[in-house]
Amino acid sequence: MNIIVFLGPSLSREEARQILPHAIYLPPVRCGDILRVLRFKPNIIGIIDGYFEKTAAVWHKEILVAIENGVHIIGGSSMGALRASELTDFGMKAVGSIAHDYVNGAINDDDEVAVLHGLKQSAYLSLTDAMVNIRDTLSCALSAKMIDQYNAAIILNTAKQLFYQERTIEKALEKSLENGADKTQIKLFTQFLKKSGIKNTKKEDAILVLKTIVDKNFLENNNDKNFKANKPAFLRALQKNMMCRPFSHYEDWLPFEEKIALASRYLGPAYRLTRRLAYLLADCHGLAVDENIQADSYREKINILSEQESRRTDIAATPENYLLILMRLSGDYKNRLILEQHDPLKFQVMTCFAQYWRLIERRFLRSGINPTQQTLEEYSHNFRLTHKLYTPELINQWLIDNDMDTKAYQYMISANARLSIFILQNNIDALRSFKNDTNIWWFWEALKLTGVDQTAKDLLQYPDKIKILQEKAKKDHPDLESYAKTLDFNGEQDFMHWPLAYDTTCA
């Protein structure tokens, strides 16, 4: 049985594996992660910890998509308790006292479970105390008569007023004295803490989530909701984003194809263009499905669509036109005659991209889709800045060097704007709701189509080649942090320490 658990500061992975040894443990969940892991065909997903604030939190809708696909979702302790309490009516299993307190309305605020914690290297060590833990610790102290009701209320209210990233029991006690708490009572409660420690309800509930998965009895009464999740444009866009990219970070257990995809990031421009090609493939397939083209595979459907398009004569454009446009946009036009020989991989990716861009662009033109004048001016301005065309003289020289006149330049900017807005920025649904196959990993298909998968496989098998690319990038890009992020690394550290994965988000 394929089990995936999203776990961070609530429980160490070592302790988790003692309870549920065969699960795949991932960092705290964030927006898109549930949709991303669906391609691993999990039977059960356990959500314990999750990110928020500095990155979008996991969406309710993506959990519903997983449930719709027959995945059993169980949550408790932290982000899992929040989402489970909100989605119990749709089949998500809520486990533990924290989740039940949310369900019953005993607690309501998200900050009850929020903590500041360390990075992955520190095993997500908690640096602050969760409000639920402070609340339950005070309850235990009251039962033990180690604090009275009045002073417990002062401590509780003081802790609640602290920002979650600054909230510790020690700071709450210090501030409580300023808020009128009795020194004797605070001293008594401090003695209780020294003896018993803070009650870690989040850890207890995290353990309960894992034990519930081990027990598997919840499977009999779970996911009995027969429903179809509504998929608005934003969710469809998120699904496509997840299927047009590699996995978020390296893990030893990842399938070989996923590791190849991650290694392809070191190919720089070829990787970025392949990633964009994945979006083009997805949208070309959406067009084919929308036109009810019947075939056994997505490639056959797109090929039929392309053949139909080629037979139309109302718009005169060939794949070569778009290849040359792509070369002008990338700055490769001057070297067009030798590009295939000097950089065959880049040339192959550009040729494939141009072919599918042509197909989409002709459909745009036939539909009369044109960016606004303001949008065109913005794209033209950004293009001139990128290519350092600061004066009319420089612009004119660029046009001469690239065999273009003003009309051709304007079309290039317009075509690039349409490509960027509707395809690369994933807004195709703004035109019409296209059906798409969310089970196809479009990025992998783009890698195979272009042959980039073989080059990336070579990098994976010979890590010294990756070291060469790392050093070259370090030399060519002074701001390696920014460059690495354009390739979907977490930053310079992640880029320079393959295959280690560094998680730099703190929440």
Image (cartoon, grey):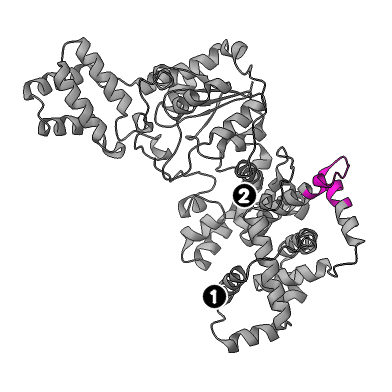
Name the amino acid type tagged 2. Answer: Ala
160 sits to left or right of 244: left
Amino acid type assigned to the residue bearing label 1 in the image: Leu
In the image, residue 348 above or below residue 160: below
How far is the residue under mark 2 from the one under mark 1?
Answer: 31 Å
Q: Nearer the viewer, mark 2 or mark 1?
A: 1
Magenta span dominant secondary structure? helix
Q: Element type at marker 1?
A: helix
On the image, the x and y values in percent for residue 278 come to 70, 51
**Relative horizontal placement of residue 348, taking residue 296 as reference (left or right):** left
- Image: magenta residue range: 287-304
What element does badge 2 sit on?
helix
- Residue 1 spot, x, y in % from top left: 64, 20
For residue 363, say whether it is visible: yes
Decide which of 438, 17 is in the foreground and name it.
438
Name the spot of residue 178 as percent of width and height, x first. 10, 34
Q: Is residue 341 visible?
A: no
Q: Name the residue tied to disc 2.
A: 263
- In the picture as drawn, the residue positioned furthest to the bottom comes out as 393
At horizontal 90% and vertical 66% (from top left) the residue drawn is 313
Residue located 66% across and 71% down the image: 413
Q: Residue at x 59, y 16 (%)?
A: 222
Query: Does label 2 or label 1 sit earlier along the sequence?
Result: 2
Label drawn at residue 81: none
Which residue lies under the disc numbered 1? 385
Residue 291 inside the magenta-drawn segment: yes
